[in-house]
Amino acid sequence: MASNDLKTRERYSASFDKELLASLKDLSKETMIPLSKLLDKGIELLLKEYNKK
């Protein structure tokens, strides 16, 4: 998939704490919500906490 196939999203590579990532993957499986959507929500909540959005 070419990067220009993404219309409203942008690819980003990062590293995560292994336990946090495992818990996030478990949550994704349990809720059937894609990992990227859970990360979007987490970032949104963090930005709200810091009054950035």
Image (cartoon, rainbow, N blue to C red):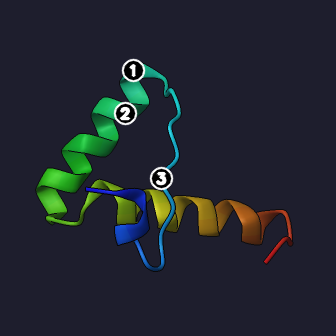
Q: Position of residue 25 (x, y in %)?
A: 25, 42
CA–CA distance between discs 1 and 2?
Answer: 5 Å
- The kind of residue tagged 1 is Lys
Identified at 49% across, 28% down, the residue is: 16
Dot 3: within a 10 Å radius of its alpha carbon, few (fewer than 14), some, or many (20 or more) residues?
Answer: few
Query: What residue does disc 3 label?
Result: 11
- The kind of residue tagged 2 is Leu
CA–CA distance between discs 3 and 1?
Answer: 21 Å
| Left or right of residue 3: residue 52 | right
- Reply above or below: 48 against 25: below
Identified at 86% across, 72% down, the residue is: 51
Q: Secondary structure at mark 1?
A: helix
Q: Secondary structure at mark 2?
A: helix
Res. 37 image quadrant: bottom left
Find out whether the residues at labels 1 and 2 contact each other: C-beta distance under 8 Å: yes
Of pointers 3 and 2, the one earlier in the residue sequence: 3
Identified at 47% across, 69% down, the residue is: 9
Identified at 39% across, 20% down, the residue is: 18
Res. 48 image quadrant: bottom right
Find out whether the residues at labels 3 and 2 contact each other: C-beta distance under 8 Å: no
- The kind of residue tagged 3 is Arg
Of pointers 3 and 1, the one earlier in the residue sequence: 3
- Reply above or below: 2 against 25: below
Query: What residue does disc 1 label?
Result: 18
Q: Position of residue 23 (x, y in %)?
A: 31, 37
Query: What residue does disc 2 label?
Result: 21
**Between residues 2 and 10, which one lies in front from this camera angle?**
2
In this rendering, which labeled residue sits more in front, label 3 or label 1?
3
Q: Secondary structure at mark 3?
A: loop
